[in-house]
Image: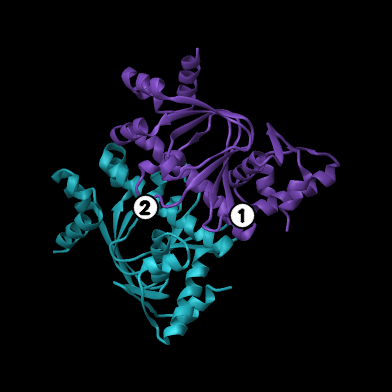
Chain colours: A cyan, B purple
Amino acid sequence: MQSNHMIETFKQYLTFFSSLTHAQQALIVENTQLKHYAKNETLLSDVSECSGLIVVKFGQLRAFYSTEEGKQITLYRLLDGDVCIMSASCVLKNITFEVSLAFETDSEIYIIPIRIWRDLSQTNLTVQAYAMELMAARFSEVMWVMEQLVFKGIGERVATFLMEQSTLVQSDILTTTHEVVANNLSTAREVISRTLKHFESDGIIALSRGVIKIVDFKKLQALIA
Amino acid sequence: MQSNHMIETFKQYLTFFSSLTHAQQALIVENTQLKHYAKNETLLSDVSECSGLIVVKFGQLRAFYSTEEGKQITLYRLLDGDVCIMSASCVLKNITFEVSLAFETDSEIYIIPIRIWRDLSQTNLTVQAYAMELMAARFSEVMWVMEQLVFKGIGERVATFLMEQSTLVQSDILTTTHEVVANNLSTAREVISRTLKHFESDGIIALSRGVIKIVDFKKLQALIA
């Protein structure tokens, strides 16, 4: 039962999984651990705890970077089905920073052990391409975070726009498309979609087709200088 | 002659090059362009100009990120023999940001065309592993930059230490090792080495064995809040 759910999850979220041989799939399934973490626990990604490739069964994790001085920068969040490659980064030369994970709700995660992940990613082109894409995605998210931290850029402008619209229609429900927001702010739709997705992951808004619902006005206001 | 120099450069700096077949090596050499850029020219990495893998023959390039608002964040510098993978990032899904290059001196760069790089990196495990390592290194540098921008962290502490030592010995030449600096600042030698390398690339200091020479006191002072 347990392993059936695992296989379904891996087929859905690890795009390389179906391309593996049956023997490789079995090796992963037999060695993967399902671990439960309680809210507020943390998992470090330093060499001593380089755990492996993490697939979130359910829950909410905050990935953050700790500075030398012990300050934290939130980089991105992991939700159901998300995969964390930074917990497997000890496989990679040249990664000189550490990303830690904080569990924001009770969560269950699958951990594919590092030795299995290392073998796979070093011998299989499809797996390696998957790893590269995942890292590229994380890199892109971090660049976005950096821009917000340094310049309070597009995030602040989108927040301001949503506040104004909400006041205008006297509602927390805005009937609008990403395209419309983009046109109003003279930027690309992709930029708006990325920004709104970040807001959603931060619990500020909820997105559905043609609708943006503001769920936390206080956090939204905090984005505006 | 030209292609001999190219082959030597590639063998030295593209660690995968020697592992390629003769046919693959020949394909790269025949299609690589050598381009000259004058000081202050720029090269964008957006989709329209996704040029390929760049190997710096000689010169100095500044890699920077442009925000939506047109502000710039310097990410790292490329010197003789350095390789720029971000100029080939259109090969990658999930890269949603653009890195531009500004030539800080007259420079010559080899450009391995994007179609050749795409084929190689998608079919060759060694090449793909090289690409992954290069991206991991850039990702790490960007994290360092982010920490400096947000917290003025270790950079400021090292700058302060160098200034103090310089005052102490009344000289711009500091006879000291990275280990000693690390011990003084209660951090790891690797962190100090990375920081000093950044300072050197920014033209603030010059490094040689057991010696740190301060070449730009004004820039060093500017790092201290």
Q: Residue A160 placed where, x, y %?
A: 51, 74
In what quadrant of the picture does the C terminus of chain A appear? bottom right
Residue name at image x 31 percent, y 73 percent: A210
Left or right position of A44 against A147: left
Residue at numbered disc 1: B148
Does any portion of residue A41 appear in the rendered image?
no
Quarter of the rendering containing residue B204:
top right
Q: Is residue B41 above or below residue A27?
A: above
Single out the mark in the foreground, 2 or 1. 1
Q: Is residue B116 above or below residue A32?
A: above
Pick whichever, A75 or A180, lies toward us.
A180
Q: Provide the residue designation for mark 2.
A: A85
Q: Tell me whether marks 2 and 1 sit on the same chain.
A: no
Chain name for mark 1: B
Which is nearer the eye, B86 or A11? B86
B22 with respect to A30 (left or right): right
Count of numbered badges drawn on the protein: 2
CA separation in Å, label 2 and label 1: 24 Å
The residue carrying pointer 1 sits among few (fewer than 14), some (14 to 19) or many (20 or more) residues within 10 Å by Cα, namely some
Q: Chain of mark 2?
A: A
Q: Secondary structure at mark 1?
A: helix
Q: Tell me if residue A84 can be seen.
A: yes
Mark 2, residues whose alpha carbon is within 10 Å: few (<14), some, or many (≥20)? some
Label annotation for residue A140: none
Q: In x, y percent, where is residue B158?
A: 69, 49
Q: Amino acid at mark 1?
A: Gln
Q: Position of residue A152 (x, y in %)?
A: 55, 65
Q: Quadrant of the N terminus of chain A?
A: bottom left
Percent across and percent down for residue A153 are 54, 63
* B145 lies left or right of A64: right
